[in-house]
Amino acid sequence: MAAPPGVHAMIHHLIATPADRGLIRTDPTQLFDRFGVPDAAREVLNQGGRDDLHGLGIHPNLIIKWLIWSGRATITPFAISYYFDRR
């Protein structure tokens, strides 16, 4: 299944333009309108979890980024040194 129109382009834009990432929390409608994200996908992008976003056909790497930027990360970040320091 392909992601809804505009979703991948929007997330790729946010990768390249970190200053716009705050819009996810403050004014996601502005992003959705700019990239032509369909209304049916907007609620899932705003409220959905990892499996819901995957169900839309969004690439897993982009799901992780979206969830982190939206404050809904499903994995707690940790320093990679955690693994190296234990060796």
Image (tube, rainbow, N blue to C red):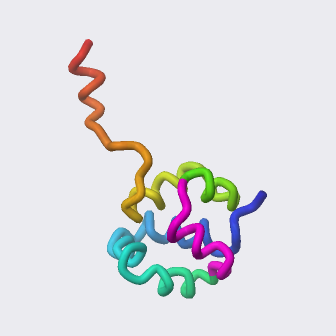
Q: Is residue 3 above or below residue 34?
A: above
Q: Main secondary structure of the magenta part?
A: helix
Residue 62 in sight? no
User: Was residue 45 drawn as part of the magenta stretch in this picture?
Assistant: yes
Q: How many marks?
A: 0
Image coordinates for residue 37, horizontal then vertical, percent:
63, 79
Residue extending farthest top = 87
Q: Is residue 57 above or below residue 23?
A: above
User: Was residue 17 drawn as part of the magenta stretch in this picture?
Assistant: no
Image coordinates for residue 82, horizontal then vertical, percent:
25, 27
Residue at the image point whose x is 69% and y is 74% from the top: 5
| Quadrant assignment for the C terminus | top left
Q: Is residue 12 left or right of residue 26?
A: right
Start-end of magenta stretch: 37-49
Residue 54, quarter of the rendered image: bottom right
Q: Is residue 75 left or right of residue 54?
A: left
Residue 64 in sight? yes
Residue at the image point whose x is 45% and y is 58% from the top: 67
